Image (spheres, rainbow, N blue to C red):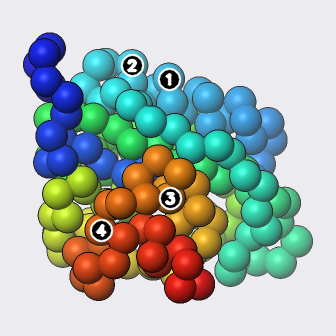
Amino acid sequence: MGEGHPPRPNECYAIAVGANRGNRLDHIRRAAATVQADGELKIIAQSRLVETAPVGGPAGQDAFLNGAWIVATRLGPHQVLHRLQAAETAGGRARTVPWGPRTIDLDLILRGDGLRVASAVLDLPHPRFAGRAFVLAPLAEIAGDWRDPLTGMTVRELLARL
C-alpha cells in the first residue's frame, strides 16, 4: 500500500471479530496486535464491539463480544486467511467443538472489490455472513456500502432485510 494513496478496494478486506471465553476484550485487542505485527496487514477501520448471544453450537455458551475490522494489505485472500488463523492460534483458539466457545474468532468476510473465491479452504464472500446480524451490524458501521457480490446488495441492505 505505498505511501501517498489510500488503499484500493482490492487491497481491503472485511473481517468479523468475536470472542466469548475469558477476557473477551483483551483477546480481541491481542488479536488486533498480532494481525498487524509484521506490517503486512493494517487495521484501517474498527466498528464498535457489541455483546451478542451465541448462534448455533453447544448450549450454555457465554455471550460473544463481536465487531468488525477493515484491513488493508497487498496480500491475497488465502494469505490473509492464513494470517487470521495464525492469530487465532496465537490467541489460544482450539478448534475442538464446531461453533463452540472460543477465545478469538476472526472470519474473512468480503474483499472491497467483491472478489469471489471458492477453494478447498476459503469461500469468499463468507458463505453465512448475509444472514448473521452479529456480523452485518458491526460491518455496516464501517463498510455499509460494500456489496455482497452474490446478491448485489450492500451490507446495509442485507442488515435491513434481516
Residue at horizontal 31%, vertical 19%? 38
Residue under pointer 3: 140
Tag 1: amino acid: Ala
> Which comes before the other along the chain, label 3 or label 1?
1
The answer to whether residue 22 is above or below residue 31 is below
Confirm or deny contact between disc 2 and disc 3 (CB under 8 A): no
Residue at horizontal 20%, vertical 29%? 6
Q: Position of residue 66 (x, y in %)?
A: 65, 53
Confirm or deny contact between disc 1 and disc 2 (CB under 8 A): yes
Q: Position of residue 136 (x, y in %)?
A: 53, 66
* Residue nearer the viewer, 64 or 132: 132
CA gap, disc 1 and disc 2 = 6 Å
Quarter occupied by residue 83 = top left
Tag 4: amino acid: Arg
**Which of pointers 3 and 1 indicates the residue nearer the eye?**
3
Q: Position of residue 71 (x, y in %)?
A: 34, 38
Residue that lies at the very extreme toward the top in this rendered image: 3
Residue 147 badge: 4
* Residue nearer the viewer, 144 or 24: 144
Residue under pointer 1: 33
Confirm or deny contact between disc 3 and disc 1 (CB under 8 A): no
Residue 3 badge: none
How many neighbours does mark 3 have within 10 angstroms: few (below 14), some (14-19), or many (20 or more)?
A: many
Residue under pointer 2: 37
